[in-house]
Amino acid sequence: MAKKIPEKVVSRLTFYHSIVSEFIEQNKKNITSSQLAQRLNIDDSQVRKDFKLLNEVGRCRVGYCTKDLKENIEKTLGFSNKRNAFIVGAGHLGLALAKYDKFDNYGLNILALFDNDPLKIDMQINEKKIYHIAKLPELACELNVDIAILTVPKPFAQDVADFLIESGIRYIWNFTPCVLNAPEHIKVWNENLMASFLQFACKEID
Amino acid sequence: MAKKIPEKVVSRLTFYHSIVSEFIEQNKKNITSSQLAQRLNIDDSQVRKDFKLLNEVGRCRVGYCTKDLKENIEKTLGFSNKRNAFIVGAGHLGLALAKYDKFDNYGLNILALFDNDPLKIDMQINEKKIYHIAKLPELACELNVDIAILTVPKPFAQDVADFLIESGIRYIWNFTPCVLNAPEHIKVWNENLMASFLQFACKEID
DNA sequence: ATTTAATGGTGACAATTATCACAATTGAAT
DNA sequence: ATTCAATTGTGATAATTGTCACCATTAAAT
C-alpha cells in the first residue's frame, strides 16, 4: 500500500463500502457525503476528508460516483491482497467466523479449521474442512499459512498459542479473552469484545 | 461515572484487568508498568498515564498493588452497573456470545436468546433460554430490557432491527456485517470485524 | 440568463492520544 | 551510611483525529 491510511479511516472505509454496495444494488449512481455521514452518525466533512485521502473526487450537487467509489475503497484497502489463514478452535465462535462471508471479499482466505474434538474432525463448514490440531504444523508449512484466528476456550488459549508459534504461525488474531504471552516477533491482535461493549456503554448508555 | 475515561484508555483497562487478574491468581502482590506494557506492546509511560486517570498510585521500585489495581479498574469501568440484554439470533455467533463468560463479569447480563427456528426454541445455553422471536416485545417490556445484541444472518438484519426498535429496544450492538438504518434516538454500535482485521493487516502484516 | 440551494473542497483550529525525557523516589546491595 | 538501579510521576511535545466555518462549484428551478 502506497499511502498509509490512518486506523480510524480504515474502519470508516469498510462502512462506506457496505453502504455504497447497497446503493449500487439499488441502481443508485451517486452518493453524497451527507448521506454517508447521516447513516454513520458522523460529520459529513469527515467523509469528504476521508475520500480526499483516496483521491476520490465528487461533483457538486451530485456527490460521488458509487461505482468509482466502491472500486477505489477496494483498491485502497487492498482487497486483492489475498492472505491465507486458519481458524483454530471449531466451537461456536470458530464456526461463526468460518461462515462470515466478508472475509473472502476482503482478501482473508480461511483455508481450514482445527480442533481436537474427534467428532468434529473431517466435518465441512462453508467448504472448509476441520482437521485435527495435530495436522496444523504440516498443513501450515504446506499451504504457506502464517495467520491463525484463535477461537479456543479460554483455558487452552496460551498453550495452543505456544503450539501455533512453534508451528510457524507469525500472526495471531486472538478472539479469546486472554492476553497472550508471545515473543516479540509474533504479532498478536486482540479482538476485545468487552472493550468494545464498554466503549458503547460509557458513551451511549445512561 | 464521575470522570470521563477516554475510549482508548477503556480498551486498555480491560487488558490490564485480565493481566492483573492473572498475576493475582499467581499470588503476585505487585505489578509494574513495564510488565504490563511489555505484554501489550505499548509504552510503559502510557500505562502510568492511564493509572493516573484512576488515581492509582504505585510505589517506586515495587509497582502497583495488584489487588488495589484490580478493584480500581472494576470500579472505574462500572462493573457493578448491571445491564440486561437479549441476544437476537441463536446461530453460531449468538451461541458463542451467550457462552462468553466475560459479559457477566463486566456487568452485561444476557437474559435470553431469540430465534425463529422452531428446533432451537426452548433450548438452554449457559442457563439462558432461547425464545421465539415473537415473544421478544413482551419479554423486553416485562424484563425491562432495552439492549439487543444482533447476530442474525445478513439478509434479515435490517428487518429484525426494525422489529427490535418497534419492540422498545433502544441500544443495538450490531454484529451483522450491515450498516443498519435506524432513527436517531436509537443507538447502534457496529462491531466491525473486517475493520479490525484490516487494521491488523495494514499495520502488521507485510 | 439568472438565481438558488445543495454539495464538495479545504484551511484553521480543537480535541484526543501517544511518545519522550528526565527528575524524584526508594528498595536492595554493599 | 552510601551507592546503585529500578521504578514511578509528569511536563513537554508530537502525532493523530475530529469539528467547524466558509468558499467554490454547479444542477435545477425560474
Image (cartoon, coloured by chain):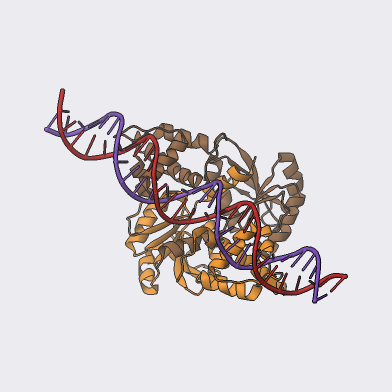
Chain colours: A brown, B orange, C red, D purple
Q: Which of the 4 image quarters holds residue A59? A: top left
Viewer-proximal residue among A128 and A156: A156
Q: Which of the 4 image quarters holds residue B11? A: bottom right
Q: Residue at x 46, y 61 (%)?
A: A200
Q: Residue at x 38, y 59 (%)?
A: B187
Location of residue A206 in the rendering, given as x and y in whole percent from the top left corner: 39, 68
Q: Residue at x 35, y 56 (%)?
A: B162
Left or right position of D30 against A191:
left
Q: Is residue B178 above or below residue B16?
A: above
Location of residue C30 in the rendering, given as x and y in whole percent from the top left corner: 88, 70
Viewer-proximal residue among B134 and B165: B165
Viewer-proximal residue among A47 and A159: A47
Res. B114 in view: no
Q: Is residue B174 above or below residue A49?
A: below
Q: Is residue B40 above or below residue A13?
A: below
Left or right position of A139 against A149:
right
Q: Residue at x 74, y 51 (%)?
A: A165
Q: Which of the 4 image quarters holds residue B186? A: bottom left
The C terminus of chain B appears in which quarter of the rendering? top right
Viewer-proximal residue among B158 and B32: B32
Q: Is residue B54 above or below residue A32?
A: below
Location of residue B44 in the rendering, given as x and y in whole percent from the top left corner: 64, 59
